[in-house]
Image (cartoon, grey):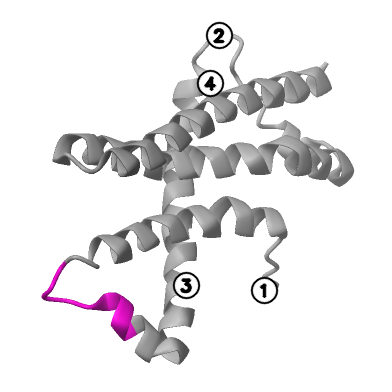
Amino acid sequence: MGLSLKPHQLVAHWIPGAFPLILIIFSCLNNSESDPVGWLIQHPVISLPIFAILAFVVGQVLDSFRDLCEWMLDLIPGYCVNWDFFVKNSSEEREKLEATHFTYYVFNMNLAIVLIPASLLAIIIDGSIAVKILLTVPAIILTADALVLRKEIVKHTNHAKK
């Protein structure tokens, strides 16, 4: 079985997967009972590959959640993606759409899936104003941009069907 990771997979899955792990590590900094950052620094040969693998797995879980939610967005009139486009069209057309829209849509949605609950937790738990802003503003921007990108994907995939 050939396994090839393309840059869009790394951008759309690994980075959003690494983000919650980084949030967890930083949230442990104030915990006097554990020192995960110190352990990570002391054991880079072990911790870096584990972190990379966990980040990709978490990213895949986030992407699976996004995949499961796609059908809800497809129920909105005028917002339904022609998913057959990705199977039936030439690899050149598919790669062009992935490079210009789909990868960024997936990245934005996957990262928003992390940032939205993190920002809500920061608001509920009474985090600092800086933390609230650093989590909430990107969550709003990424979600809005993802919805705009999805609308473009809808336009391109449904236009190709005709």
- The magenta stretch spans which residues? 31-39
Mark closest to the chain's N terminus, 4 or 1: 1
Camera-side mark, 1 or 3: 3
Q: Residues within 10 Å of mark 2 (few under 14, many from 20)?
A: few
Up-down: is 138 above or below 158? below
Q: In which quarter of the view is residue 89 placed? A: top right
Q: Earlier in the sequence, mark 1 or mark 3?
A: 1
Residue 26 image offset from top left, x and y in percent = 31, 63
Q: Quadrant of residue 86?
A: top right
User: Dot 4 corresponds to which residue?
Assistant: 74
| Residue on which disc 3 sits | 53
| Magenta-drawn stretch contains 30 | no
**x and y percentages locating residue 130 in the rendered image:** 33, 42
Which residue is disc 2 drawn over?
77
Could you tell whether 62 is left or right of 128 in the image?
A: right
**Labelled pair 4, 3 in contact (Cβ < 8 Å):** no
In contact (CB < 8 Å): disc 2 and disc 4: no
Instruction: Tell me the CA gap for discs 4 and 1.
Output: 33 Å
